[in-house]
Image: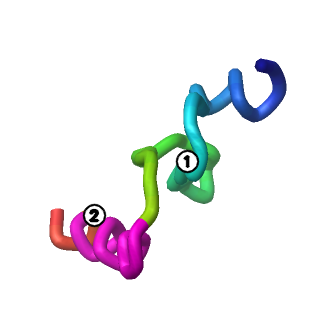
Amino acid sequence: MKGIFMQYGVYGVPHFVLISPKGRIITQWLGYSKGSIKKKLEELLDK
């Protein structure tokens, strides 16, 4: 494991990483189901 896997700590697929425009990791999560990306973004916007 090297490259992006090591840089972002990816240990499973699918693995999502939300990165700010400044390159900072905001959050990351594993897995996928219908609508999961939209739900995650809505959760983050409600904070």
Amino acid type, residue under disc 2 in the picture: Leu
- Dominant SS type (magenta): helix
In the rendered image, residue 46, in percent from the top left (x then y), is placed at 17, 71
* Residue in the image at 37% along x and 80% along y: 35
Q: Residue furthest left?
A: 47
Task: Find residue 43 and report its image quarter.
Answer: bottom left
Where does residue 4 sit, x and y in percent of width and height? 76, 34
Q: Position of residue 3 (x, y in %)?
A: 82, 27
**Residue underneath mark 2:** 44
Which mark is in front, 2 or 1? 1
What span is in magenta?
33-43
Is 41 situated left or right of 42 in this image? right
Q: Secondary structure at mark 2?
A: helix
User: Is 37 part of what is drawn in magenta?
Assistant: yes
Q: Are marks 2 and 1 in contact (CB under 8 Å)?
A: no
Q: Quadrant of the N terminus?
A: top right
Disc 1 on helix, strand or loop?
A: strand
Q: Which residue is mark 1?
A: 15
Above or below, 31 against 37 in this view is: above
Residue placed most toward the observer, 25 or 36: 36
41 shown above or below 26: below
